[in-house]
Image (tube, grey):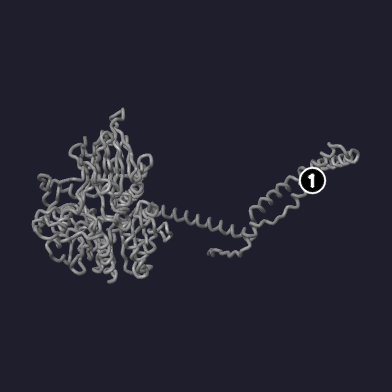
Amino acid sequence: MLRVTPIYGCDTRKVFNNNDSGISSSLATAPQSTLVEYGGVRVLINVGWDESLLLPSGEEEGESKNALQNLPSPSEVDVILITDSTLSSLGGLPLYLSSAASIPRIYGTFPTVKMGQMTLYDHHASLSLDGKDPGYALSSVDELFSPSRFTTLRYSQTLTLFSSSSPDKTEAISVTPHRAGRVVGASYFVLKRLADETEVVVAPYYHHAKERHLDSSSLHKYGAAADVLITCPGGPRGLLGSLYSSSSSSQRNKKPILNSPLVSRAHGEFIQMIMGTLRRNGNVLIPVDASGRVLELLLVLSQHWDRNRLAAAYNLCWVGPMAWNTIEFARSQLEWMATPLGAQFDTQRGHPYALKSVHICSSVAELDAIMDASNGNPTAVLASGSTLDCGPARDLLLKWAENPDNAIVLTDSTRCVLRGEILESRRDVLNVSEGVVVGGGTIAAAASSAAASVSTGIVSSALVAAKSKVTIIPDATPEVDPTTTSATATAPTTATTTEDETNLIGTSLLPQHISPYSTAAQLLLKWCQAKLTNTEMADVVEVDVPVPHRSPLAGEELRAFLAQEEAARREKKAEEERKAMLREVELARGRLRLGEDESSSAGAGAATTGTASDTKDKTSTATTAAAAATSTTSGSKRERSGSNSGGGGTTVASATLTTKSSSKKKSRFDPNLFLKFSKPLHMTFEVREE
């Protein structure tokens, strides 16, 4: 028997706007988790998470406020299969297994393990820097992806699973991963029951098109003859999805507004829009994920920069807390990528991910230093934080939005998500009927309420379009629809009146005025509404951006912080002085040609000199005895020249004397020292002022 139970990810709740004419404004596919019971084995497919879900809370029993709480107990699951390294597939793993007594075995491909770690690290850093609690520690992530918990599989590698409830192991299934495309190491799984060889294909995400860094999915090859296919609806959702279809009431019997182009055409339009912004001395902000689709964008832009030699005129940067680690892992996973990339490396034409034209930065401060060093050249930045609610992408949005020549390029609609905390806070005031939530404006500035409440640091920022329009760049990937907005936004203010409020632009919002959509979703919804009504986008678009309020240190906390900084500075300075002194000693020893051999021989000579006076009498006595023995032996030899014993004694004594004489005549020349110190030594001395 086959039983499929969607735990979450198929929520029918939709948020409607007043002017949407009944069209859902939900843009992104929700993170998924599905329980498949087949062949007596309970298989949990993915444990995803994003900002539309709530973090687990320690509230009393009652109605569940978190989707992860609906998951079965880990002890009730035989195995967990992870399809890819995105947050929508494994973002909830640390939360789900953090307090479990027994953890089931987890399976996935090798890139899923490495890139999944980078995804969770990046997500943890983005939330922690804003003062939020991600709900898990980095040590939990390391333990989760350790070889004792997470087993890696290769494509087409068959794994046999037995039911834990069948002691005789008569009930079993085989699991085989295959290439799914879209993300490095992404896979779909073929489940085959060994009793009757029926097949069930589980493919939540896949991509049929061939891209720069990945080959196309093999679903048409291994999934065509399956008995059951378990997947999720492809393509964009909500208003964005209505632009690609003619099923809406306003567009019925008409051609769709947008058509999905080929991958090559999408890449061309993507580069054309970026170059158009750079040529007018504007900067381009491209919000990206930590380790998924960003690799495709990096390869496309890097190849264009190298081919046209644009590094001297325009900067191409990648900013993210885990950017350096991600690219190092990507360089070691060419066998999981497209065939041409491996051929390029094998023929010694260079590594495809050398990224000679890309500046990799860990923070916005490093990006500012690169831009200042290039005399302010226009810059295209791929920044971590695809929702624009946190991370470097949010910081750059607030910094660059004032300039109408700058542009924002949204390349992934799956990260245009809802804000789960905002929706939950409005549960009591929204009318919930038959799974449909009615009410709540999309744009915070459009909402109105007379109730007073404490501000939470969410501010309203105005976006002013440079040419009063936004250009979309459709992608061939059903889940990815690049959208470009040429706009600027004012900087936000803090939640309450502070000293810094005079330096910021924007309006603090009350909680009931905050949009339930992320910043990226607000921008994309505004663009979709303009496209749907065949009108130009407004010159000014207001969106709200969450800004963390960091109060300055004062009093005892400030003094303790300064003391720690001073102690760390002194320790660092002392370590530098110690290393400098060791370098000077080594240089001095080199000039005097004091190698290890000479130092050891000098030590031995000193030891001999120290003991010579104490053993003078013994040495002279031993020497006299040796001389007497030698003369006696010589006399015996003359008297008995044919004696074997005498000859033997003479031979031993002669050998002993020869050995001593040869040790005194050993050459002191060491060729290693000659080669080491024959070159001129250029000494440098540090000038110190007393």
In percent of width and height, residue 19 lies at 10, 57
The image quarter in which residue 273 lies? bottom left
30, above or below 279, in the image:
above
Count of numbered marks? 1
Is 120 in front, or is 308?
308
Is 436 in front, or is 440?
436
The residue depicted at 78 percent of the width and 44 percent of the height is: 655
Is 615 in front, or is 330?
330
237, above or below 400, in the image:
above
Lateral position of residue 644 relative to residue 35, left or right:
right
Inspect the image, locate mark 1, and give the three-letter code of the amino acid beneath it: Leu
Kind of element beneath mark 1:
helix
Q: Quadrant of the N terminus?
A: top left
Residue at label 1? 657
The residue depicted at 24 percent of the width and 41 percent of the height is: 200
The image quarter in which residue 680 lies? bottom right
In percent of width and height, residue 209 lies at 26, 55
Is 408 in front, or is 229?
229
Q: Does the image show residue 186? A: yes
443, above or below 486, in the image:
above
Q: Residues within 10 Å of mark 1 (few under 14, many from 20)?
A: few
In percent of width and height, residue 253 lies at 9, 58
Q: Residue furthest bottom?
A: 280
Q: Residue furthest right?
A: 639
Q: Does the image show residue 444? A: no
Q: Residue furthest top?
A: 168
526, above or below 38, in the image:
below
In percent of width and height, residue 16 lies at 12, 52
